[in-house]
Amino acid sequence: MAKVTTSPPVPPRSWKKSATLYAGQWKQRTGSSIVLKVWTGACWSWVKVRITGRELPADTEIGSPSLIRHGKQWWLHSPVEKQFASPSKIEKQVKTCAQTKMCAVDLNLNEQVAVCTVQTVEGTILATTFIGGGREISGFRKKQLGRIARNRRKTGIIVEGEQDNVHLWGKINHVDEQIAHRVSARIVQFAREHEASILVFEHLGNLKPSRGKYSHRGNSKRAFWMKGRIFKYAKYKAYHEGILTSRVNPRNTSRECARCHSLVARYAQGTSAEGYTLGAPLVLCSQCGMRGNADRNASLVIGQRLIMRYQKSSQGKPQAPLLGERGEKSPGVAACQDAKSEEGPSLPQARHADSNEHGTAQCAV
Ligand SMILES: [Zn+2]
């Protein structure tokens, strides 16, 4: 018999996995307590425990809860399932109903992290909101990155494959994550308040390397990543509300006039309204006289691009399945048929949002 040099596998001596309580192991669940069937060490017994935290949403189905240990506390995690009809495709919504509302979002690197405008397909502007806080997050990040740079200078060497300044990086990541969630939630809330059924962003393009100190470079890189995160989170949060998300070509969205599509002058208060100053807050269109906030103008252009995509594609290639439903493109026809399709929700349908996300026009397939 061969000599065993390594110890043979043994069943785990301690069990660290969270316990799932299936049907029959819990009962009498209320907002503040639940009765659980647990093994006390000697027998199975029903124990009533107090629970705190958010109420579960009323319109959802609750799955089997799990007991998860957090230090000295036990948390009860409950999966929830919500049934909703999947929204109809963006193309269909845009082409068949002039009153379809969409919320276009311009993400920025300045104080206004996101500027959202709700407009209808026929072009009526309904509401705008500014989501601020950019300066605060950028100041916070810069401070932490400066600390990291100073620590690195002091130690001199960075060990390859090992994260330095773990605590400071953790702090930055945590705050970035929190802001991305807060901003994306606000965007979706705003869209919902104004009954928008489509959310539009611009493609982010590539990160342009910036010059300057380590803290400055690191900061702009993270601000860029944050935009991507906001998009990602907004997209899934929106889908839960039955709102689909799309992205459009970002080319010159801030240089174009939302009213007449000529190039605008971008300037700061107190300077002359000419030329194009990157990041300046105001715009003036010399062609039509439009004057206003630069980010709001950009968000309007982003929304219009989505509509133009479908108008262009409908002029170009013939699209058999949708031709019959079009025709009502002239403004004033407010027949919103089929706002929701009858199909039930499931994962395959969740992919609608995915296929709509990319910049290509979706021809009826
Ligand atoms: Zn104009």
Image: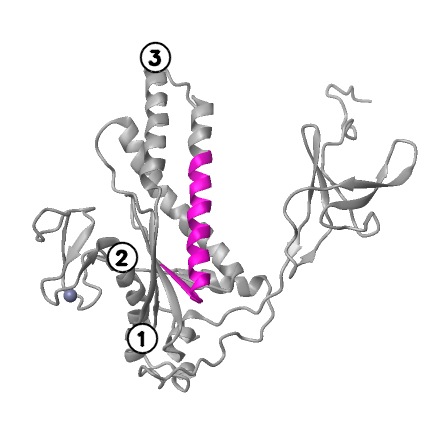
Return the disc, 1 or 2, that comes first in the chain's sequence. 1
**Which residue is pictured at 18% across the width and 66% down the height?**
261
Q: CA distance from mark 1 to mark 2?
A: 18 Å
Q: Toward the viewer: 97 or 354? A: 97
Q: Which residue is mark 1?
A: 122
Q: Does 257 appear above or below 363?
A: above
Answer with the quarter of the image where residue 177 lies.
top left
| Main secondary-structure element of the magenta-colored stretch | helix
Q: Which quadrant: the N terminus?
A: top right
Q: Amino acid at mark 3?
A: Lys
Q: Does 172 appear above or below 272?
A: above
Residue 268, how many percent across, how many down? 15, 47
Query: Total label count?
Result: 3
Q: Which residue is mark 3?
A: 154
Q: Is residue 38 magenta?
A: no
Query: In the image, which residues are magenta?
Result: 174-200
Disc 1 is placed on an element classified as loop
Nearer the camera: disc 3 or disc 1: 1
Query: Decide: marks 3, 1 in contact (CB < 8 A)?
Result: no
**Which image quarter has ligand 1?**
bottom left
Q: Which residue is mark 2?
A: 296
37 vs 326, left or right, is right
Disc 2 is placed on an element classified as helix
Q: Amino acid at mark 2?
A: Arg
Answer with the quarter of the image where residue 216 lies.
top left
The crowd level at tag 1 (other Cα within 10 Å; few <14, some 14-19, many 20+) is some
**Which residue is pictured at 47% across the width and 34% down the height?**
174
Q: Amino acid at mark 1?
A: Glu
Q: CA distance from mark 3 to mark 2?
A: 45 Å
Query: Decide: marks 3, 2 in contact (CB < 8 A)?
Result: no
